[in-house]
Image (spheres, helix red, strand yellow):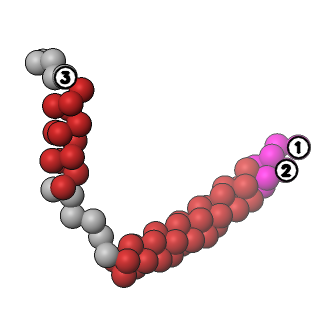
Amino acid sequence: MAKVNPGEFIRQVRAETAKVVWPTKQETIRTAVMVLIMTTLLAVFFLGVDTVFSWVVASLISLAS
C-alpha cells in the first residue's frame, strides 16, 4: 500500500466526503420511526418466546420434583 502524506490524505478524505449523499430530515425521521417500531415488535416477540420457554422449563422442573 502506498504511503500518503497527511495533506494528500486530508484532500482525499474531503473528496470522498463530498461524494456522500446525506439523507434529508424527513428521511432520517422516517427511518428512526421504522427502527423504533421494529425494535418494539422484536422486543415483544422475544418477551413472548422467553415467557413460553420459562413456563416450559418451570413445568419440566416441577415434573422432576
**Looking at the rendering, which quadrant does residue 24 occupy?**
bottom left
Q: Which amino acid does label 3 sit on?
A: Asn
Q: What residue type is labelled 1?
A: Ser
Q: Residue visible at 15% across and 18% down? A: 3
**Looking at the rendering, which quadrant does residue 53 occupy?**
bottom right
Q: Which mark is residue 40?
A: none
Q: Residue visible at 78% across and 55% down? A: 59
Left or right: residue 39 versus residue 10 is right
Q: Label 3: which residue?
A: 5
Name the N-terminal-most of marks 1 and 3. 3
Crowding around mark 2 (Cα neighbors within 10 Å: few <14, some 14 to 19, many 20+) is: few
Spot occupied by residue 49 in the image (x, y as percentages of width and height): 61, 61
Residue 38 to residue 4: above or below: below
Disc 1 or disc 3, which is closer to the eye? 3
Name the N-terminal-most of marks 2 and 3. 3
The answer to whether residue 62 is magenta is yes
Q: Which mark is residue 62?
A: 2
Left or right: residue 65 versus residue 35 is right
Query: Magenta residues, as a range?
Result: 58-65
Q: Residue visible at 11% across and 18% down? A: 2
Spot occupied by residue 43 in the image (x, y as percentages of width and height): 59, 65
Whether residues under marks 2 and 1 lie with C-beta atoms below 8 angstroms apart, the answer is yes
The N terminus sits in image quarter = top left
Q: Label 1: which residue?
A: 65
**SS label for mark 3:** loop
**SS label for mark 2:** helix
Out of 40 and 24, give the one closest to the viewer. Answer: 24
Out of 35 and 46, give the one closest to the viewer. Answer: 35
